[in-house]
Amino acid sequence: MGFIFSKAMNDSLKGQQEFMRLQLERQLVLQNLMRERQAAMQIASTREFLKYFGTFFGLSAVVLTAGAMKKKNPAFLMPIVPLGFVFAYNCDMGYGTLLQRVKGEAENILDTQSTLLELPKGPVTFEDLEKIRSQAKFFREK
């Protein structure tokens, strides 16, 4: 009698474990899908910004070059330098390999410099949360 009952319990436990594994897989797939969509939105936003900034940079370069030639003062060309760096960065972000380089550097940090990722005073524990919660409760009661 006990054997039949324990066999049914084991079957039920295995079914629950399979269901939990399936739920975890679904959650991981969903999180990855959301991350991919957020990254796509960031790249699309950068590309859209680049359209406006590229127009501004091009017009500024033409106007500043014309001003420098008319006034015979090369100082008018100085704003083109920082604007050029911003333009190049956004081009690299939207259409270049910046994201692959950042991903590679992040993987390098995870592999070789994981101590940089440690939280001050270590990870948060249940005891830390309870201590903070009890202190907050103490102040609310007064």
Image (cartoon, rainbow, N blue to C red):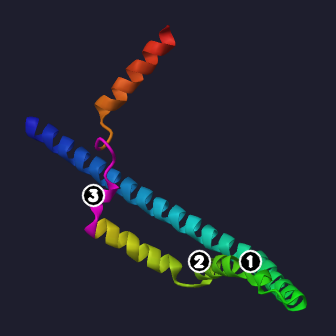
> How far apart, in angstroms, are the residues tagged by discs 1 and 2?
22 Å
Q: Is residue 1 visible?
A: no
Which amino acid type is marked by label 3?
Thr
Label drawn at residue 93? 2
Viewer-closest of 14 and 42: 42
**Quadrant hosting residue 73:** bottom right
Please say if the residues under marks 1 and 3 sit with CB atoms less than 8 Å apart: no
Magenta includes 15? Answer: no
Give the residue displayed 51% in from the left and 76% down from the top: 99
Q: In the displayed structure, does residue 77 sit left or right of residue 96?
A: right
Label drawn at residue 79? 1
Q: In this picture, is 130 found above or below 81? A: above
Query: Which residues are the magenta region?
Result: 112-122
Q: Give the label, 1 or 3, closer to the camera.
A: 1
Q: Position of residue 87 (x, y in %)?
A: 67, 79
Give the residue displayed 59% in from the left and 82% down from the top: 92
Q: In this picture, is 108 found above or below 71? A: above
